[in-house]
Structures are given as structure tokens and as C-alpha cells.
Amino acid sequence: MADPIRWGVLGASNFAATQMAPAIHAARGAELAALGTTSPGKANRFDFCPGLKVHGDYDALLADPGIDAVYIPLPNHLHVDWTLKALDAGKHVLCEKPLAMTAAEFDQVTARRDATGLLAAEAFMIVHHPQFIRARQLYNEGAIGALVRVDCVFSYDNRDEGNIRNKPETGGGALADIGVYAFGAARFVTGQEPTEITHADIREQNGVDVYAEVNATFPSFLYSGTVSMRMFPRQEITFHGEEGVMRLTCPFNANVFGEARLELTGKDPMRVTTERWPGVNHYVKQVENFCAAVRREAEYPCPLEFSRGTQEMIDRVRARAGS
């Protein structure tokens, strides 16, 4: 059996401590080996991993020859710089979304990935979940006929002014935080790109977007989506075709918001077929797929080129709202 990919986490964020570090620790073919943090007091949140090496700064972790790959959960505005530094240090990189704040910023990361021959990817975990793999399969098989419309909503309520999502200087805002999911989910399932952003209503508070309502035209369907950081929690994406409807009731926070479930309604509206995936952890799947790609056992399901396409849609939404 191949040696495990040895991981370091660049920053002791709450999300890293509660979700991604445990996922790395649990993933097959991965070993959580080190943590880099400028706040030593936060290291005790990683006690679930005995023997974890703790570095007092990020550069020290990148210089550690015992680390093969790093996960970067730093604030959004730091993602590109530290991804480039990690690649230059010879580490594979899984960076939290959004990897960049504009589509153009992706290009330097892609160029560095290609120059180093290392794997660099945005941590867009939902495409690793079997509910989305199944949704794409059903769509491609024509289970709902010709697709006419995609509707998506993703909301939560975060009014903490100290949270990085509510700070413009750290790249906060609803589009950066969850618009990635709302747009990327439609693109992943259908394999299509928007041809036009027909409507974009963005509302801001304290310099960050807290609500965005978007309509877009894709080659063969219309898209309608809403994301917000100031509404009661809700998430759902629906694919409405000429011959059926496919609905994912917990598409983005499986096991946290609810159970991952796909409901398919065909020609008989009284008959709904439901598929469930209780307990599947998409963060663990993401790490396992990353490790397999590092070993060149499989292609990584979410390359930088896909993530750039989602960011390009976000850029176009911002431009449309400002026009």
C-alpha cells in the first residue's frame, strides 16, 4: 500500500478545526501531520490528532520537508498569495473557496501549478458528494427531459461584525462565501456556462454584499438564484425539465443543515423517487480524491479551470449589478 499523503494545515481557523482537519485525519491515504498557526492557543483544538507537529508560523510549515500537501483555510484575501508560496515550496495545495477574488487571479495560480507539476485546487467540496454525482448522471441520462429552469437558494444569518465574512478587507460577502455554491452547482450538474447575466440585484451592508438575486441565461435553460447572509437558513436547488423535476433538498451542508437527499419526480407527479446519503462526508471524499490525484491514480474532479468558471460568473454578476 502506498505511503499516505502527509498534510499540513495553514492556519487554525474554526472551520479547519471542526471540519477539514478531522476530514484529513479520517481520510484514507491521508495523514494529518502538522499545523501552522500564529496563535498557539488555538492548537489545542486539534488534539484529536495525537502527535501533530505545531509550527509557530506559516513559513515554517511550508519549509517542513515532512509535508506533502497543505490545506489553506485563511481569510479569502490571502488565498492566492499563500497558494503560490506553498507551490513554490513544493507542496500540493487545497485552498478554501473562493481561491481568488476575481477570475483573472486564477491565471497566475494555474500557471504556477503547470510550472511546478503539483496539484492545486479550490476546496469546492460539493462536487465530491454522491448526490451531485448522481444528479449529473440523471441529468445526462435525460431523466427530466430537456432542462428548462434551475432554481437555487442558499441563505444563513450572520450579523457578527467581527466575522471575516462581514469584513470587506478580508474578502467577505455572500457571493464569495456561498455564491460559489449556488453558481457552481448548476454548472457542475449541467456542464453549461452562462451566456448572459440578465438580472443582478446586490444589496450591501458595511461594504460587503449580504444579499444577491441573480437571473442568468444558459445555452439550454434559465437560471434563478438567491444567496444571502441576512436571511433564515435555507438551501435547495431544483432542476426543472420538460419531463420531470429533480430537487436536492440539502445540497451544500449535508449532515449539518440536514440529510443529503435527491427527489426525482417523473411523468407521474404522484410518484416521487427519493435517494438518500446519510452520513456521507463530502470533506473526507474531497481529501481522498485529492490524494488519489496526487498519486496520479485518478483525475481530480474539480480542477482550477472549473473553479475559475464559477468565479467568472460571480465577476459578471457584480458587473451586471454595477451597470
Image (spheres, rainbow, N blue to C red):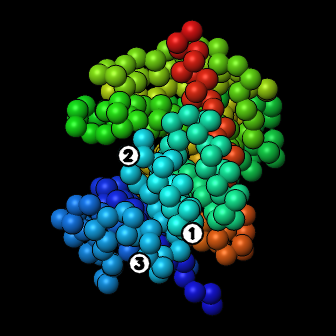
Q: Nearer the viewer, residue 85 or 118?
A: 85
Q: How far separated are the C-alphas under marks 3 and 1?
A: 16 Å
Position of 183 compared to 147: left or right? left
Residue type at the position of mark 2 = Pro
Q: Residue at x 30, y 74 (%)?
A: 54
First in sequence, mark 3 or 1: give its number: 3
Are the residues at dot 3 and dot 1 in contact (C-beta closer than 8 Å)? Answer: no
Between circles 3 and 1, the one closer to the viewer is 1
- The answer to which image quadrant residue 237 occupies is top right
Q: Secondary structure at mark 2?
A: loop
Relative image position of residue 8 (x, y in whole percent):
43, 70
Q: Which residue is mark 3?
A: 33
- The answer to which image quadrant residue 267 occupies is top right
Q: Quadrant of the C terminus?
A: top right
The mark found on residue 75 in the picture is 2
Within 10 angstroms of label 2, few (less than 14), some, or many (20 or more) residues? some
